[in-house]
Image (tube, coloured by chain):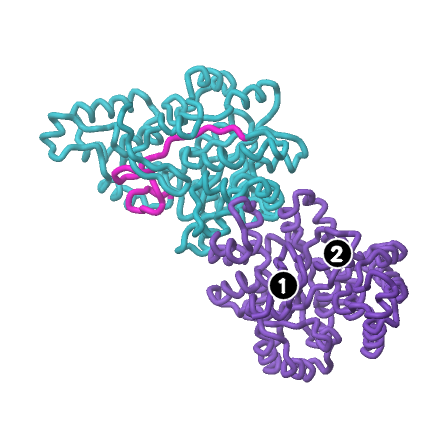
Chain colours: A purple, B cyan
Amino acid sequence: MSEEKEFVVTPWEVRGEIDYERLIRDFGTTKVDSELLERIKKDAGELHLFLKRGLFFSHRDMNWILDRYEAGEKFFLYTGRGPSGHTHLGHLVPWIFTKWLQDRFGAELYFQMTDDEKFLFNQELSLKTTMSFTYENALDVIALGFDPKKTFIFSNVEYVKTLYKIALEIAKHVNFSTVKAVFGFQNTTNIGMIFFPALQAAPCFLPSVLEGKNIPCLIPASIDQDPYWRGIAREVAPKLGYYKPAQIHNKLVPGLGKGGKMSASEPETAIFTTDDPDVAVKKIMSSYTGGRDTAEEQRRLGGRADICPVYHNYEFLFVPDDKELKKLYDDCKTGKMLCGECKMIFASKLKPFLKEHQKKREKAKGMLDKFMVKD
Amino acid sequence: MSEEKEFVVTPWEVRGEIDYERLIRDFGTTKVDSELLERIKKDAGELHLFLKRGLFFSHRDMNWILDRYEAGEKFFLYTGRGPSGHTHLGHLVPWIFTKWLQDRFGAELYFQMTDDEKFLFNQELSLKTTMSFTYENALDVIALGFDPKKTFIFSNVEYVKTLYKIALEIAKHVNFSTVKAVFGFQNTTNIGMIFFPALQAAPCFLPSVLEGKNIPCLIPASIDQDPYWRGIAREVAPKLGYYKPAQIHNKLVPGLGKGGKMSASEPETAIFTTDDPDVAVKKIMSSYTGGRDTAEEQRRLGGRADICPVYHNYEFLFVPDDKELKKLYDDCKTGKMLCGECKMIFASKLKPFLKEHQKKREKAKGMLDKFMVKD
């Protein structure tokens, strides 16, 4: 048995170098294989870059949901965001993919802002703050071009009257032992956090409740959120007579530091959609890379693109062209291109991206009413 | 040290013969003494029968709240009901007293229906059922003559949007160890129940939140609800910058069986406000009493009024005249009156009481909108 790397992936903490193959085993999910890719391509009419590149790498029940779809039964999408701060590039990955799913499958989207969770979890954050980030983050969602007729964004706090009834039905089937095992909750965990998994699971069944018939649910989200679906939603679904939600999981976008995902709690290693482009470029310039100690050494040995957050940012978001990506990879690995030059390339791609996104984000301010649902 | 009787008093279970003096010690409350009674009499202009008879026997911070009142600061009242079934006579006691407090002190009343709790706690009850009992029970509250301009009755499920924000602030300061110690929650307790104490505590601070300034709160309620105030609301209040809620506690109305409080879960020993008067009389006729095994023995030894639920029902609700009550007591204790005769007296008082209440309850159906508040 090979030596296993130390890493942690939970909804609240991601640490170390993640072994995604091992996560598939540990979480009991299924690898997105070439057969599934073929099927998605057939049903969607194309294959999204994130699928081609293996960034959405793991799933549960994708074949089941495509069975339903091919039989004429529409599914809905459910994803969300914990509004603890501004949106960063890492958040955009599942959202961009969700938008593609909406377009390709004509699916409605329920988008949950867990302002309650972020308040409960973080001693420093007031409820007023997390609720205001709900709206800030919603601007980024809207800026990606979701269909206002098919997209329902809600703050948990402002939509709780609708959610609470479903959460109660879920909560009656989940005890402390379960959340202790699934999330590692302790006796010191506050009672709001203990209840919260019921609220995060509730939207899985919301359209079924609203329409009075079972509607399949597909959750595109980062793999770190898996415990909510594995341990709560999918366990309780059959007890309440609902379908188990299907899932497709993406890898985590690395931060600009050494190891770990891009995280709002480490602002110097995260590029926020609201960052002034010049500030963002400075963050790139300070980024950790896969570079060597000296230029000489790097010319000789080559860079390590595979562990470089700059390269992974290309892969996720900034270099859709496979040939261009391969050239960047090869130029790094052969030592032809040094990190300084590569960072300049990243900067030249990031600046227009941010400017364009910020323009759309500004425009989104007039569209909040079309997207936000409240009680 | 005298031998202590076995009894249990929790929000969900009341068992055995209750030693109220010991509850005062165990719960750390203060006895309602003659000095406090004098003060209430002065401020209220009269003394309610329940105070004269020692049925409201225990309190916390009553002198503090009267200090505030005498200094010109209004307090509000908060009490409630767990709508697991129809209202019985035992429920009416704190409500009648609450009505008197409202009249005498010009106080607003927030009345919580914990339809969420009763659903979570009872495997047999659906949310639909507990929510429908919210409205059934509200009719009984309204029938007692509360001021519609000053009375706000709410279902937790239907008012949760308002309550949830406050509950979150509370929940952030309460962990599993605390609810384990205060309520005896276990690892098998469901996560809805674990969170619920935050929702029951929330109305203590609701008017303060709504009006943007601290408003004193007085909770008239049965002593079995004390853990919510002692262990949660009063602990968290100073951390959130609110006043600790004051309380005044009543003794529990005994059921018609041997020991324990009147309980909706034992319908044969509880008289419901919705009972057909003839059915109620049958329950009286089957009631446990303080009688002896034979008529001869009872004539010789006398009855035991002190342990008799029929006598206690006189004391609480049906014989406001002290002289009449004393005569009933003496006639029992001396063996002059046997239980059959006494039950006939009870029946003769209960029937018109129920008929009158049911008439008012019917009229209340047209007044629900004036009393119920929703999000």
Residue under numbered circle 2: A137
Where is residue A208? Give x, y as percent: 57, 67
- SS class of the residue under badge 2? helix
Residue A215 shown in magenta = no
Nearest to the eye among marks 2 and 1: give it: 1
Residue under numbered circle 1: A5
Who comes first in sequence, dot 2 or dot 1? 1
Quadrant of the drawing holding the N terminus of chain B? top left
Instruction: State which quadrant residue A224 falls in.
Output: bottom right
- A273 displayed left or right of B64: right
Callout 2: 10 Å neighbours few (<14), some, many (20+)?
many
Task: Work out whether residue A368 can be spotted.
Answer: no
Q: Give the range drawn in magenta.
A: B245-273
Mark carried by residue B284: none
Task: Work out whether residue A108 can be spotted.
Answer: yes
A118 lies above or below B103: below
B94 lies above or below A350: above
Q: Mark 1 lies on which chain?
A: A
Labels 2 and 1 touching (C-beta < 8 A)? no
For the stretch drawn in magenta, what is the main secondary structure?
Answer: loop
Instruction: State which quadrant residue B69 falls in.
Output: top right
Residue kind at label 1, given as amino acid type: Lys
B194 lies above or below B320: below
- A72 displayed left or right of B102: right
Residue kind at label 2, given as amino acid type: Asn
A184 lies above or below B90: below
* Circles 2 and 1 on the same chain: yes
Where is residue A217? Give x, y as percent: 60, 69
